[in-house]
Image (cartoon, helix red, strand yellow):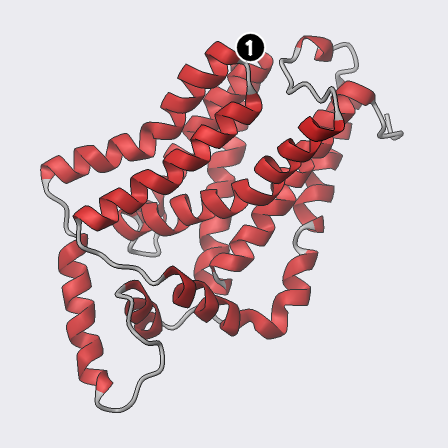
């Protein structure tokens, strides 16, 4: 698999056609210089960007911790992670042709989509196995005290599946691996990716703490998600944004399996 070509991406970000003729080569250099200048942030813009990257924590802390409503939290979470970046990009006068950008990413990976879909199974099996091992080693942990989403009827279950397993990976990858990386992770080193990955893991700490009320487990969750952020960043850089979304679906699917099993114990291996 090959990553998206830089020139094509820049033109997609500027809302321009992806196909180029020889006369457009010089324009690409000008487009790149213009985009780089737009990506420079003033102190005020850095503060605003930090608030946007902290917005998931604010939503989790104010909505989930007060209402205990997972569907409402996910809805507001997805709205914020969509609207705030669009407003920020508009303020910076950066016009992105989202359709062209995703189609370009898709075109680069068309021959590998069947293999990409298999990526869903890798984290789903791996993380579920970790969960089964944990329950085997710690059978007396008070799992019944965990504050899990209530799945009382089919409609609620369908909403949670749509919001958490289908929509969430798309929204989060566009937010963390595209928008946040656009301003904080423009290089490919560990340091360049550190900012977005830290925020990605930090907001999950608040989610984990709400669920288990356990500082040790919450911190373990933070470390795991922080590491996952680097994995997803690597996948996005090497194989494309859509592949990162597919891998993220597998992670959220594993989380969904764990949540359902904690309430109904359908996994027979422990």
Circle 1 Cα neighbour tier, 10 Å, few/some/many (<14 / 14–19 / ≥20)? some
Q: Nearer the viewer, residue 30 or 226?
A: 30
Quadrant in which the N terminus is drawn: bottom right
Residue pointed to by mark 1: 213
Image coords of residue 232 (percent x, y): 50, 49
Name which quarter of the figure residue 109 lies in.
bottom right
Residue 7 percent across, percent down from the top left: 30, 74
Please state if 184 lies on the left or on the right of 65 as rendered: left
Q: Residue furthest front?
A: 155
Q: Secondary structure at mark 1?
A: loop
| Quadrant, the C terminus | top right
Residue at horizontal 36%, vertical 48%? Answer: 190
Residue at image location 40% in from the left, 68% down from the top:
100
Locate residue 248, reporting x and y percent. 57, 46
- 107 w.r.t. 196: above or below: below
Q: Can residue 241 be seen here?
A: yes
Please name the residue shown 55% across and 58% down the image: 243
Whether residue 3 can be seen here: no
Is 137 positioned to the left or the right of 176 in the image?
A: right
- Total numbered labels: 1
In the image, is 123 to the left or to the right of 262?
left
Q: Identify the image quadrant of residue 52.
A: top left
Residue at 67% across / 8% down in the picture?
A: 145
């Amino acid at each position: 698999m090959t990553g998206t070509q830089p020139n094509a991406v820049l033109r997609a970000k500027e809302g321009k056609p992806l196909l180029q003729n020889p006369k457009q080569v010089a324009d690409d250099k000008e487009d790149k210089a213009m985009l780089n200048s737009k990506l420079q942030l003033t102190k005020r813009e850095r503060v605003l960007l930090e608030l946007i990257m902290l917005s998931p924590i604010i939503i989790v802390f104010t909505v989930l911790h007060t209402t205990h409503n997972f569907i409402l939290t996910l809805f507001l979470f997805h709205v914020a992670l969509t609207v705030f970046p669009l407003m920020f990009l508009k303020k910076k006068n950066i016009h992105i042709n989202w359709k062209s950008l995703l189609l370009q990413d898709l075109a680069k990976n068309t021959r590998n989509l069947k293999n990409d879909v298999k990526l869903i199974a890798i984290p789903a099996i791996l993380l579920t196995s970790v969960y089964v091992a944990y329950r085997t080693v710690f059978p007396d942990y008070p799992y019944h005290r965990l504050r899990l989403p209530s799945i009382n009827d089919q409609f609620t279950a369908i909403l949670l599946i749509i919001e958490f397993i289908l929509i969430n990976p798309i929204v989060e990858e566009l937010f963390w691996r595209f928008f946040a990386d656009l301003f904080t992770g423009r290089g490919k080193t560990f340091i360049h990716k550190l900012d977005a990955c830290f925020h990605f893991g930090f907001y999950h700490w608040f989610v984990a703490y709400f669920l288990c009320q356990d500082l040790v487990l919450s911190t373990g969750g933070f470390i795991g998600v922080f590491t996952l952020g680097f994995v997803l960043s690597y996948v996005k850089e090497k194989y494309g944004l859509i592949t990162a979304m597919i891998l993220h679906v597998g992670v959220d699917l594993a989380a969904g399996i764990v949540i359902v099993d904690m309430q109904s114990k359908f996994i027979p291996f422990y």
